[in-house]
Structures are given as C-alpha cells and as structure tokens.
Image (tube, rainbow, N blue to C red):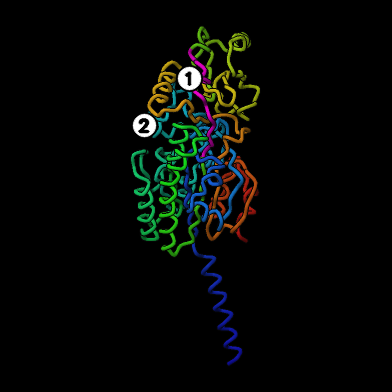
Amino acid sequence: MKRLLIVVLVLGIVFSVYSQESKPSYVILISLDGFRYDYVERFKPENLSRFIETGTAADGLIPSFPSKTFPNHYTIATGMKPEHHGLVDNSFYDPTKNLVYTMGNREIVEDGYWYGGTPLWVLAEQNGMKAASYFFVGSEAPVKGIRPSYYYPYDGNVPNLTRVAKVFEWLQLPETERPRLITLYFSDMDNTGHRYGPNNDEKLKGSLDKLDPELGALFEGLKSFDFDINIILVSDHGMANVPKEKLINLDVLTKGIDARVVNNGALAHLHLAKPEQKTEVIEILRQRPGNFKIEDVTSLVSYDDISRYPDRIGDLLILPELGYYLADERGIFRYQNNSAMFKTDVFGEHGYSPEYREMHGIFYAKGPAIKEGLRIDRFENIHIYPLICKILGLPIPAEIDGKAAVLAPILKD
C-alpha cells in the first residue's frame, strides 16, 4: 500500500510537470512608438512602473540606423538591420521599380515586394501557429506571400482601448483559431514628442497619464486568461530636441546638384545622376554652410553593409548634427505653422545615429518565461526576434542579425 502511494505521488508530480511544460506560450509584442528610455523614470506611470518591478527591464533599447519608425519596427519584427531587410528608411527610392517607398502610400505599404526577411508573424504562420496584428510595420503586406491570420490596415484614429479589446477577443477564440503571437502599436508618445519635443514634461506627462491606464487595462484583463502570456514592451526609437532655428533648408543645400534627393530630417539620400562625379559633389556640398556631414555610403559608417540593397541607399548621405534637421521648403513652412499652432519653438525628431543616447528606446518584458525583478544593460533591438522565437518554440532563421545568446539570461530555466 505504501509503495502504491509513492507511485501515485510520483506519477502525479510527473503529470503536473508534463502539464506545465506542454502548456503553450503566448507572446504579446507591444510597441510604444517614440517612447524614450528615460520617460518612465521621469514620469513614474503607475501601471508601467508596476509592470517593470515584476519583470525584466533594460537600461535602454538601441535602435538600428536610421532611428526611424518603419526601419526599426521592421527590424524588431525580423531580427535584421534595415540594410538587410530592405526598409532602409521611412522613405527611399528603388531604381528597379523606379518608385519611392513612402509610409503614406497604401498601395506600396501593402506590397510584399518591399519587405525582406521573415517577420515573426510569417514565421509563426509557416510553423502552424496563428498570429494577429493590430498594427505593426509590414503586417499589412504579404511577405513571402503570408500575412498574419488576423490583421488591420493602419488607422491612427482607432482608439487604444479598441485595440486592447480586440486582443481579449482574439484570446477568447477556440484554441485552433487563437493567435499565440499578437502585435500591438500605440503612437501617443511619438505624436506628443514630435509636436513639443522630449523635454516638455507637461505635455509628455499628459499623454502618458492617458496611455498608462489603457495599458493597465490590458495588463489587468490578461490576468483573466489561464494562458502563459508573455508581454514584451518596446519602442522603435527615442527623441531629440530640434529648435526651429536649427532647420537646414535642404532645397538650398542641394541646389545645382544633379541628383535625386530622397527623404529629409536626420538624413537625406542622394542618388547621383552621374555617380562617377561623386568626389566633386562631395567637395561642393562640404563647402556649403551648415551643421551637417556628407557620407559616402561605400565607407560603411552608418549602414554596416550595402551589398543587399545598394540601390535603395543611394550614393551619398547628408547627415545633420544632433539637434539640426533637414527640411525642404514645404517642410519649413509646415514647421512654421506648427510653431504658431502649438505655441512652441522646439520640436522633437529622431533618425540620428544610434550612438546618441537620445535615440534609445525601451525594452520591458514580463511573463511566465521571463525572470522577475531583473535589470539588464541596453542592447540592440535586433536581438528581440530570437528571444520571441525561443519563447514560442519557433526555429530561428539563420539569416538574422540578432543573437539568441544576448537575451538568453532573462529567460527562466
């Protein structure tokens, strides 16, 4: 009888362990666009602060170059740097198609041609796992012919709580239809940071005071599900102050240069009509006044590698110093209007080198797979992809730039 009791107890323990190990993991990847590394410490939002206390938090998240929205969201989604996944900027020229990729062109944004790599939702679907996205760069396009099982075309007017409610709906689906990977996107802090700059505590705190309870509603609601749900909070970039007197007129700067000038802001791409004249063009631009530098893309300073998408990057880059910003005539007019409308002479911008601390974002994670109360050093955002693969039990593609070893220490044994 005693021996039978021991056997029953052992079998019970084995069954319990097996049940825990076989319970599927879920990941909710949330992007808080433009959320700088220091906002939580400065404003101490209640729900985010509580989330951080019981999870893992990094000292910052280092974006890829350029520290822009589309390149870095897609880097997080693919584990690849922009020069490897193809979204080399928010706007860029592709000579093969003779088209300029722009965020506002719905037809282009939804065309899988532009997107390289294997986004997390594509990897999940390829491995028989449902994925869902309430906005994330690339999720609207058929990358490798695949979209998430559930997704929405981007619409910034959709309230945050509507997005949160949809997560709960997805998780209530039958197991065979339920997504185990969900992405969410919130733009509140980016919008405010652009409009008023990252040092306007009053405006930023006002936006965060609204966003934080909405995130709190998500965190609280997820507790009602008996699933192993891991939440990963990230941002694509930080933000830097740009006083309006530090705008550099890009039209004046490039006047007389025979080149296609693509994009502005923290960098502009020059596609020379006669690339053999590159040296002469560099000298002309260097003699023009302004706080900027000219970079030959073949020098491999900003972009680590141009072998995959050289035509999208161009021949030369114009890179203003931190706090200065390139704007064409229309852009300067828009800044002047915004200055009057919002009663501010300072704006917030990004796109600069990841070496600047101001460009760093956030990484906070919490869930059954994540260690509690852990603080880690800042790291590059390419390493988030293999972490999520590990949690979900997905194979890690050999082509990615991220390394599983970087974030392995935050996972529970």
Which residue of the protein is positioned furthest toward the bottom in this rendering?
A: 1
Residue at 51% x, 48% y is 233
Which residues are drawn in magenta?
Answer: 236-251
Q: Quadrant of the C terminus?
A: bottom right
Residue at 58% x, 92% y is 1
| Residue 248 magenta-highlighted | yes
Residue 189 in the image: x percent, y percent? 46, 39
Residue 8 in the image: x percent, y percent? 55, 83
Decide: is 93 above or below 119: above
Q: Nearer the viewer, mark 1 or mark 2?
A: 1
Which of the marked residues, 1 or 2, is nearer the chain's N terminus?
2
How crowded is the residue under tag 1: few (<14 C-alpha within 10 Å), some, or many (20+)?
Answer: many
- Position of 124 with respect to 410 (left or right) is left
How crowded is the residue under tag 2: few (<14 C-alpha within 10 Å), some, or many (20+)?
Answer: few
* Residue nearest the viewer, comparing 166 with 305: 166
Which residue is labeled 2 in the image? 106
Quadrant in the rendering for residue 187: top left
Q: Is residue 380 visible?
A: yes
Pointer 1 with pointer 2, Cβ within 8 A? no
Residue type at tag 1: Ala
Q: Measure the alpha-carbon separation of dots 1 and 2.
A: 24 Å
Residue 364 in the image: x percent, y percent? 55, 50
Residue 121 in the image: x percent, y percent? 46, 46
- Position of 295 with respect to 367 (left or right) is right
Residue type at tag 2: Arg
| Residue 60 magenta-highlighted | no
Please tell me the numbered disc located at residue 120.
none
Which residue of the protein is positioned furthest toward the top in this rendering?
A: 256
Decide: is 277 above or below 247: above
Q: Is residue 144 visible?
A: no
Which residue is labeled 1 in the image? 327
Looking at the rendered structure, the secondary structure element under dot 1 is strand
